[in-house]
Image (spheres, rainbow, N blue to C red):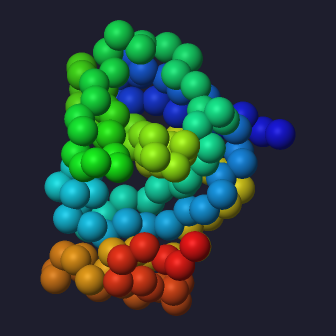
Amino acid sequence: MTTLIGSCVCSEITFSVEDQFAYAGYCHCSLCRKSSGASGTAIGGILSKYFKITKGQQHLKRYHRSADTVSCFCGLCGSTLFGEKPSINRVHIRYGALNASPSLLPQAHMHVASKADWYEITDLLPQFEAFPPQ
């Protein structure tokens, strides 16, 4: 199995993740928009056991943004890197933090009910008002 490497902008934090993503998509929720400063973010969900911080653990900051999500970012450069989902034993990797493309590309748009009104989705991927059905 291929191992992907990711990092923050300043490269003080690096991580590795096995290329075994269970799902991937574009999230347009207001929290992803705020944390990314963009119309949303591309994420891939993976079992926690396939993810590891390889450098810079001391620089990693955590923000408990909801009962189900802990946003993790670099305390030096501010890059958002991943979200911990302890209740489902998953990590949501921000695809933009990866140094190479994962094999599973985004499959859908989620939380489009709260997407920015100035952003128009123009691809043909399925769109879901909240989370896609399991």
| Residue positioned 60% across, 32% down in the render | 51
Is residue 95 visible in this depiction of the protein? no
Where is residue 75 shown, x and y percent of the image?
Answer: 24, 22
Q: Left or right? Give the position of 32 relative to 57.
A: left
Query: Splitting the image into 4 quarters, where does residue 89 fall?
Result: top right
On screen, 106 above or below 78?
Answer: below
Front residue of this view, candidates 43 and 12: 43
Where is residue 128 shown, x and y percent of the image?
Answer: 42, 83
Where is residue 20 shown, x and y percent of the image?
Answer: 72, 48
Q: Left or right? Give the position of 131 relative to 66.
A: right
| Residue positioned 27% across, 57% down in the render | 32
Front residue of this view, candidates 22 and 87: 87
Q: Left or right? Give the position of 60 relative to 131.
A: left
Is residue 85 visible in this depiction of the protein? yes
On screen, 66 above or below 63?
Answer: below
Query: Splitting the image into 4 quarters, where does residue 31 fall?
Result: bottom left
On screen, 60 above or below 48?
Answer: above
Where is residue 13 shown, x and y percent of the image?
Answer: 42, 20
| Residue positioned 52% across, 22% down in the render | 53
The mark tally for this picture is 0
Quarter of the figure with the N terminus: top right
Q: Left or right? Give the position of 79 relative to 132.
A: left
Front residue of this view, candidates 52 and 100: 52
| Residue positioned 16% across, 81% down in the render | 118
Quarter of the figure with the C terminus: bottom right
